[in-house]
């Protein structure tokens, strides 16, 4: 592989409709690693580009799931519920608290949407 293989063709994502994804064929060199590159057109017209060492067929869907989890933990920690402020160390109690906070978060989210 050559460093030039990082080049993304201008038309890579331009033709995509909102919600459509596409992957470049084969691996590309990114920061010295051979990786797959996939992209998705978002509803606001911007692009989401996902770089992965796994198969590009599931990269965008895997990223969506991971982003949902990251968002949940962000809300449970520094964006509102301050979970880390409890200083809990017992695993069983922490697990119960995380479950409770996840339910509380879902309730808040649903109420906010309503």
Image (spheres, helix red, strand yellow):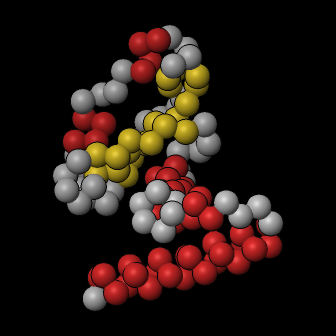
Which corner quadrant of the image does residue 52 belong to?
top right
Apparent side of residue 93 relative to residue 1 in the rendered image (left or right): right
Residue shown at 38% from the left, 79% from the top: 109
Indicate the quadrant where residue 112 lies.
bottom left
Q: Residue 80 in the image: x percent, y percent? A: 42, 66
Q: Is residue 41 visible?
A: yes
Q: Give the image quarter of residue 54.
A: top right
Q: Is residue 69 visible?
A: no
User: Tag count in the figure?
Assistant: 0
Question: Compared to 100, does 69 lie above or below?
Answer: above
Q: Position of residue 59 (x, y in %)?
A: 52, 49
Is 95 left or right of 90, judged from the image as shown?
A: left
Quick one: quadrant of the C terminus? bottom left
In the displayed structure, 47 sits above or below 42; it is: above
Q: Residue at x 23, y 48 (%)?
A: 46
Q: Name the residue nearer the viewer: 67 or 44.
A: 67
Name the quadrant of the N terminus: top right
At 34% from the left and 46% from the top, the residue drawn is 48
């Amino acid at each position: 592989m050559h460093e030039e293989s990082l080049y993304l063709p201008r038309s890579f994502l331009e033709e995509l409709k909102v919600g459509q994804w596409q992957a470049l064929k084969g691996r590309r060199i990114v920061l010295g690693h051979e990786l797959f590159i996939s992209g998705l057109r978002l509803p606001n017209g911007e692009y989401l580009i996902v770089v992965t060492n796994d198969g590009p067929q599931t990269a965008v869907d895997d990223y969506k799931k991971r982003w949902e989890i990251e968002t949940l933990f962000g809300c449970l920690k520094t964006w509102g519920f301050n979970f880390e402020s409890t200083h809990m160390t017992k695993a069983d109690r922490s697990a119960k608290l995380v479950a409770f906070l996840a339910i509380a978060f879902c309730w808040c989210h649903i109420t906010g949407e309503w």
